[in-house]
Image (spheres, helix red, strand yellow):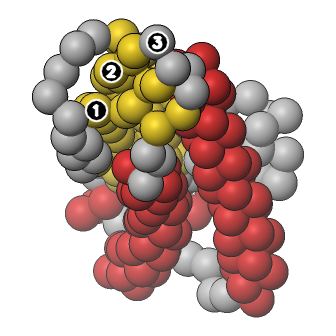
Amino acid sequence: MKFTAPIISILLVLLPSFLSAKTEISFSSQYYSFQAHDKASIWKGIAAKSPKVSQKDHVRHQVIVGLTEWDLRQHYRFRGSLNRCELVGATTQLNVSIHLPYWEDKWKAPGYLQKSWDQYVRMVSDHEGIHKAYAIRTAERIDKEVSELVHEKDCEQLKAYIDEIVQKHMQQNRLDNRWFDAKEKIYQKHAAWF
């Protein structure tokens, strides 16, 4: 799982008083291709073509088979006066990209290996789907909590509260993903691999 720090742009404008916070979500799937004829060449293909990420961020994995990357962008609009500032508009955009392996010439391999591969890739895809769900949940939690803010004495204080909310939920997302990966590692140790 990799994410990009949220980009928060803040505009101070006079607008009608209303707040709508709905996350706009876009997804994409990226496939890295390789050719193979047996288990050893499958792993060689994965090692050579899989997403390259910082091992510092993915210390638990020798090779990244699947990867979920996401980018969260937020734009807020405020209305300010002498002793009052309120949030009057919010836009959140979440872009999620999942990277998965694609065995190009799988059809040349024995049927049992094809079947094992299909089960394995389904497991990897399901795993990355959980990381995607965590990203969506994080964006929605931020939207919900920010939309509940009423007003503050000044816009700097309101901006600081929004930043605290964002940081809190981003930290929770990191913890959730670490917990999930650790739990999955234990499961995968005992699972039947292709």
Question: How many neighbours does mark 1 have within 10 angstroms: few (below 14), some (14-19), or many (20 or more)?
Answer: many
Q: Position of residue 36 (x, y in %)?
A: 44, 50
The three-letter code of the residue at mark 3 reads: Leu
The dot on residue 82 is 3
Position of residue 29 in the picture relative to residue 3 (left or right): left
Give the camera-side residue of 1 and 148.
Answer: 148
The dot on residue 48 is none
Q: CA distance from mark 1 to mark 2?
A: 6 Å
Position of residue 180 in the picture relative to residue 61 (left or right): left
Dot 1 or dot 2: first in sequence order is: 2
Q: Residue at x 44, y 25 (%)?
A: 85
When the figure is inspected, residue 135 is found, relative to residue 111, above or below; the finding is above
Does dot 3 land on a helix, a strand or a loop?
Answer: loop
Question: How many neighbours does mark 3 have within 10 angstroms: few (below 14), some (14-19), or many (20 or more)?
Answer: few
- The answer to whether any part of residue 88 appears in the image is yes
Instruction: State the residue position of label 1.
Output: 88
Give the camera-side residue of 14 and 69.
Answer: 14
Which quadrant would the C terminus be assigned to in this image? bottom right
Discs 1, 2 touching: Cβ within 8 Å: yes
Q: CA distance from mark 1 to mark 3?
A: 16 Å
Q: Position of residue 43 (x, y in %)?
A: 61, 52
Position of residue 46 in the picture relative to residue 172 (left or right): left
Instruction: State the residue position of label 2.
Output: 79
The three-letter code of the residue at mark 2 reads: Arg
